[in-house]
Image (cartoon, rainbow, N blue to C red):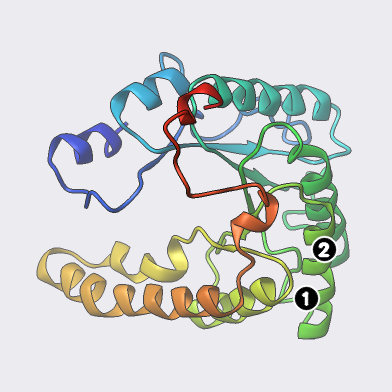
Amino acid sequence: QYGAAQAIAAGAIEKSCGLLVAVEKTGYTGDPAARESQILPGWSVEKISRMGADGVKLLLYYHPEAPNAAEQEARVAEVGELCQQNAMPFFLEPLSFSLDPDVKKLPSLEKRAVVVETARRLTPFGVDVLKAEFPINIGDEKDEAVWAEACVEVSNVSVCPWIILSAGVTFDEFKRQTAVACRNGASGVLVGRAVWAEAADLTGPARQEFLQPTAVERMRQLTAIIEDFGRPWTDFHPDYDKTVTEEWYKTY
């Protein structure tokens, strides 16, 4: 609403950089134990494609045992079909939640089960990349061997490449998560606050001074980990061939 088309119109995005645009309305409606995600009214996959973006992202509140799980799954399938029709990569970002309103944060074991089951259920619905929560609450579980086991479980059930979000952890914590995830089947990250959180409290030159050296260096460090250990997306598309023949259009 405030950045996507504006960034394109201003020429602020490097041509070598892809632009991923959300299709959902911020927040959720419905009961806290049956959260409903909605498409932003007046917005669509087709409009995202027409504006010149390179991919579609859907943030979905999801718990496999929620009363409305089937409806949320149908929403994913709908967006997946529209992305295929418009030749747009589909990035799905499911966010777990507790079914008990008195529990604000899923315990680590339950979160692990939910993240794994979410990947198993939702990735077959035309999802190109799963933007997953790290499957362990690292505040509850310190053993990186347990982290690795949980990441392997996600890798075993996801039918598409999966990457991790940062969920507001510190950069050092996220760097550890990235290394463990990529060593155990993840393909990368789609990261926000772990890289730039401090900039939100800065203004003017101070903000730019933080973003240019610090945030950029953080991205370089994450990229190096991903290049060393991340699973290539081509593993999921073994028939991918960069060769373009004169009859390429017949099967496109």
Q: Is residue 145 left or right of residue 233?
A: right
The image quarter containing residue 33 is top right
Q: Is residue 230 left or right of residue 243?
A: right
Q: Is residue 85 above or below residue 213?
A: above
Along the viewing direction, whichever of 141 and 133 lies nearer the viewer: 133
Disc 1 marks a residue whose amino acid type is: Trp
The image quarter containing residue 73 is top right
Residue 84 in picture, x, y percent from top left: 57, 25
Residue located 48% across and 49% down the image: 242
Residue located 17% across and 68% down the image: 208
Q: Is residue 42 visible?
A: yes
Disc 2 marks a residue whose amino acid type is: Pro
Q: Label 1: which residue?
A: 147
Residue located 43% across and 18% down the image: 46
Along the viewing direction, whichever of 98 and 181 lies nearer the viewer: 181
Q: Label 2: which residue?
A: 107
Secondary structure, mark 2, is loop
Residue 186 in picture, x, y percent from top left: 66, 65
Mark 1 packing: few (<14 Cα in 10 Å), some, or many (20+)? Answer: many
Secondary structure, mark 1, is helix
Disc 1, disc 2: CB below 8 Å? no
Mark 2 packing: few (<14 Cα in 10 Å), some, or many (20+)? Answer: some
Residue 55 in picture, x, y percent from top left: 45, 38
